Each structure stands twice: as C-alpha cells, then as structure tokens.
Image (tube, rainbow, N blue to C red):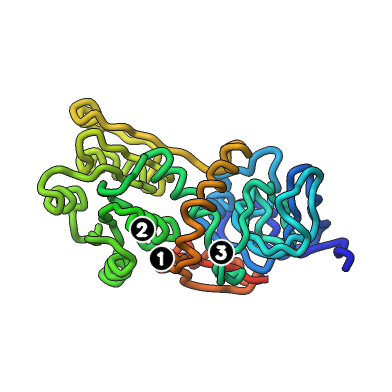
C-alpha cells in the first residue's frame, strides 16, 4: 500500500502552556540513510517534551522540531543501508524528535523489536525511560548487585523504571515520593523504603536505614535544591547521577567538602545530544540485558493514562500536575 502524502502532527507555533500545541497537517518525513520510517500506533509523553514546549529544551539542528522522543508502531520504509529491520516489523524507538506525529523517521540503531507479548501502548512506554535509566544508573553510575541506591521521583516514568531495574539486578532500593499512595506504589514496585519527601528528611531516613553508611548511588532529577542532601546521603566512594533540574540548575552556598572526604563522584547526562553510536550501544545493552526481563514479566512499564493523539494538551496538563504514577501514552 502506498504511503500517504501528508500526515497529522502536533505543531508548536510558539512556546508556552499546553494550549499552544495544535494538530496540523504536513508532509511525511523521509527515512535518511541509516533510518527507518515508522507508522505510529502510540507515543510516550515525557518531561523533556514539556521542556521543549516551554522553550528550554531545543531540538538538535539535524532533528525534527516536532515534539516526541519515544514511539511504537510499524516499519513502513527503510533508509539506505538499513539491514536489521524489514517492512512490516513492529518496533519501538528512541526518536531524536518527531514522535508526536502519525509517521516518524528514527535511526535504526535506536529501534528495538517489541518485547515478547507487548502491544504498541506498552512498547511506547519503554524507550526514553529505559535508555535514560540504563545509561545513567548502570553505565555511568555503575550500580551493581549488592549495592544500594536512592531514586528520587519514584513514581515518575523514570522512577518506576529505575526502581524495577535496580531491584531486578540485585540492588537495595530507597526512593522518594510526594504522598502516602505514591510511596505505597513505589514499595510495591520493589523499593525497600519509600520516603515521603513532604514530611520526612530523605537524607536522614537513608542514613537511619543504612545504619549511617549511606547509599552507593543517588539518581536525581531535582538538581540544586537537593544537592547538599544528596551528597550527605551517599556512602564513601558513592556516585550522584543527575538527569534533570526540576529544582534548579544553580546551587548557592553548598558545602562541597563531602565530595573530597567521601571520595564522591558527581556525574550527569542528557540523552538527546548523545551520538548515534552511543545510543546504539545503549540499545544493544538493553536488548541483551533488559528485553529478556520484559519478556519474562520481571520488569514492566507502569502506565497511568492512555489518551488519543488529539488530546495532547490534556496529556501535558496531566504531566505537569505530577499526580500520575508511571507513564502517559498517546495513541494514534
């Protein structure tokens, strides 16, 4: 069946509140060398999408300016040199942009076949969070079996993924969340102790839970507001991995002495600027280490809401409200 000449997509005429997004029509993207063209069935909604909509997270120069970083659907065209996929394959993928559309071109090295037993909605909830958690928690921070980790935002898409993966690979998990219900949900996912940050000092709780030692790794998305307490919560030779700055990027009057005294490592990254080769390496490790866990049901995406594509404004309002537990997914 020939491809249509046009597609619907979420247009962003200006930066601002969710209401600035509108449904528009435009030409299909073309699969460049090394890319595949995917007809979307579902797309994940993520914090970076909100930041891009607000004007603080621009798309790379060679990427689509359309919002959306994770997609799932059917391969309908192959770019030059692509041999690992075929027309008709059902894949999910980490997109460099363009995910809020009926068709999206993605690098083949960032695409993965649906895990066994998965539909498009569940598959679309995987790429952005699993790429991010694997790269930051396991590759960069080096979390291993027998270690302990504090994961902030335990009921976010990142948090629910990180808790499950850390637990599956033999780590002891502590996490923070903002309500009793969210704390209970995080503990059901595998956290040994969920800390209600509205009523408890997470650094003090971690110290008490670990008999004064602290944790080996902190996965943080808050940034400046939590920096000093994060350093205090770490054990000797621990690592703080920062993946977002929801609490600010500039920290004033912070005591950095614990970094030297405890030989700490502070690291961080964003996924979007990584090279295609780096993303392919993460993809390959996910296929080898994590996809079997998804197929076995040991780990699974937590999905809070599934909304039709034309309700993208409501999806962003829900994301900004932070009342959700897990992922928000759009369907086509």
Residue nearest the observer in this picture, 163 or 220: 163
Residues at marks 3 and 1, CA–CA distance in whole angstroms = 12 Å
From the viewer's perspective, is 262 left or right of 127? left
Residue at figure coordinates x 29%, y 43% from the top left: 217
Residue identifier under label 1: 298
Vertical placement of residue 32 versus 92, above or below? above
Query: Which secondary structure, mark 1?
Result: loop
Neighbours of disc 2 within 10 Å: few (<14), some (14-19), many (20+): some
Residue at figure coordinates x 18%, y 27% from the top left: 261
| Residues at circles 3 and 1 in contact by the CB criterion of under 8 Å | no
Residue at figure coordinates x 50%, y 66% from the top left: 295
The quadrant of the image that shows the C terminus is bottom right
Q: Quadrant of residue 298?
A: bottom left
The percent coordinates of residue 17 (x first, y second) are 56, 58
The percent coordinates of residue 45 (x first, y second) are 55, 61
Neighbours of disc 3 within 10 Å: few (<14), some (14-19), many (20+): many
The percent coordinates of residue 238 (x first, y second) are 26, 37
| Residues at circles 2 and 3 in contact by the CB criterion of under 8 Å | no
Residue nearest the observer in this picture, 319 or 208: 208
Residue identifier under label 3: 115
Residues at marks 1 and 2, CA–CA distance in whole angstroms = 7 Å
| Residues at circles 1 and 2 in contact by the CB criterion of under 8 Å | yes
Tell me which label, 2 or 3, sits earlier in the chain: 3
From the viewer's perspective, is 302 left or right of 197? right
Residue nearest the observer in this picture, 22 or 2: 2
Query: Which secondary structure, mark 3?
Result: loop
Residue identifier under label 2: 168
The percent coordinates of residue 255 (x first, y second) are 22, 31
Query: Which secondary structure, mark 2?
Result: helix
Residues at marks 2 and 3, CA–CA distance in whole angstroms = 17 Å
């Amino acid at each position: 069946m020939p491809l249509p000449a046009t597609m619907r997509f979420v247009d962003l005429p200006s930066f601002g509140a969710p209401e600035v997004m509108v449904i528009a029509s435009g030409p299909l993207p073309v699969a460049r060398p090394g890319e595949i063209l995917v007809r979307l069935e579902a797309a994940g909604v993520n914090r970076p999408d909100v930041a891009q909509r607000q004007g603080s997270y621009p798309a790379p120069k060679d990427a689509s300016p359309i919002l959306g970083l994770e997609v799932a659907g059917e391969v309908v065209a192959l770019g030059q040199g692509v041999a690992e996929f075929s027309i008709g394959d059902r894949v999910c993928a980490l997109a460099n942009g363009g995910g809020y559309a009926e068709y999206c071109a993605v690098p083949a090295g960032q695409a993965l076949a649906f895990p066994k037993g998965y539909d498009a909605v569940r598959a679309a909830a995987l790429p952005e969070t699993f790429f991010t958690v694997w790269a930051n928690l396991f590759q960069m921070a080096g979390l291993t079996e027998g270690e302990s980790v504090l994961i902030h935002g335990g009921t976010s898409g990142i948090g629910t993924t990180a808790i499950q993966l850390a637990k599956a690979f033999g780590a002891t998990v502590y996490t923070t969340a903002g309500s009793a219900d969210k704390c209970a949900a995080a503990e059901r996912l595998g956290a040994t102790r969920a800390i209600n940050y509205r009523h408890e000092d997470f650094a003090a709780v971690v110290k008490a839970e670990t008999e004064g030692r602290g944790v080996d790794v902190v996965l943080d998305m808050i940034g400046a507001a939590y920096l000093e307490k994060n350093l205090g919560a770490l054990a000797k030779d621990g690592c703080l991995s920062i993946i977002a700055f929801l609490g600010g990027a500039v920290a004033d009057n912070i005591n950095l002495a614990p970094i030297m005294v405890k030989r700490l490592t502070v690291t961080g990254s964003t996924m979007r600027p990584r090279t295609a080769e780096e993303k392919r390496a993460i993809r390959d490790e996910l296929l080898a280490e994590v996809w079997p866990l998804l197929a076995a049901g040991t780990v699974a995406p937590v999905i809070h809401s599934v909304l039709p594509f034309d309700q993208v404004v409501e999806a962003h309002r829900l994301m900004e409200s932070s009342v959700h537990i897990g992922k928000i997914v759009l369907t086509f």
